[in-house]
Image (cartoon, helix red, strand yellow):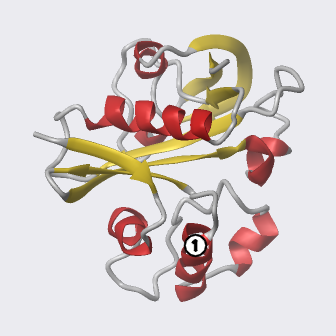
Amino acid sequence: MAIEVRPAHDFDDVATMLGPKNPVSSVCWCLSWRLDSAQNRALTGPARADRVRQLCSRHLAPGVIAHLDGDVAGWAGIAPRSELHPFAHSRKIPHVDDLAVWSLWCIRVRPGFRKRGLTPALMEGAVDYARESGAPAVEGYPVDNGGQRVDLTMAYVGTREMFERAGFEKVADTTAIAGGFPRIVMRRMLG
């Protein structure tokens, strides 16, 4: 079993992970954390796919994609926090300091590929991409669920334990909640 994680410059790979079955549907496309609320509401249907296509064509990829034996199997959204409007301007998820951190905010593995080590590989691949791109640190904002089950619709944020296994440390509490659990700020220094 060969897992390869690389920057998400291939739009078709990203569409496999994030796109809707019906191309005119308005799904997240992992844009909800990139846009302010007015932009997010205004950008609908195929325009969301077009925006992601633009992000994939930039020098800085919108995240990383994992392939398992050549098949698209997972996604992790990672970018400078300054590019992520809801995090950059959040009143609930604090800025710990002035460090120009990158945020790892979404981790998804396709059904049929789960429980094969993709989540740790995605997280490490995202951290490696941030490091190679000059990030001083990566933050995540997972739930502190105390080992309780997290509803799959909110599991994309990750759990404290998942981030701890990937070498992150808790650096702050937040007032944000996801799936009924408090979110925390976890950080991994890269320097």
Q: Which of the pair 128/11 is nearer the observer?
A: 128
Q: Residue at x 61, y 30 (%)?
A: 141
The residue shown at (23%, 31%) is 117
Q: Nearer the viewer, residue 52 or 106?
A: 52
Name the residue at the right extreme.
98
Vertical relation: 59 (above or below) 82: below
Secondary element at image label 1: helix
Identity of the residue furthest to the left in this view: 1
- Identify which amino acid the numbered label 1 is placed on: Ser
Q: Is residue 179 visible in the rendered structure shown here?
A: no
Please tell me how crowded label 1 is: few (under 14), some (14-19), or many (20+) other residues with Cα within 10 Å: some
Residue position marked by numbered label 1 in the rendering: 57
103 left or right of 162 in image: right
Q: Position of residue 82 (x, y in %)?
A: 80, 46
**Relative height, residue 80 to residue 97 (above, below):** below
**Relative side of 68 to 10, left or right:** left
Residue 55 x, y percent position in the rendering: 61, 68
The answer, for residue 141, to whether it is visible in the render is yes
- The percent position of residue 139, horizontal first and vertical second, equals 64, 28
From the top left corner, tell me how far across and down residue 158 is, in percent: 46, 31
Please name whichever residue, 110 or 55, is drawn nearer the observer in this view of the structure: 55
Please determine whether, in this image, residue 12 is positioned above or below residue 75: below
At horizontal 54% and vertical 77% (from top left) the residue drawn is 53
Closest to the observer, 137 or 179 = 137
Residue at 43%, 37% in the rendered image: 125
Quarter of the C terminus within the rendering: top right
Count of marks placed on residues: 1
Rendered view: 15 above or below 151: below
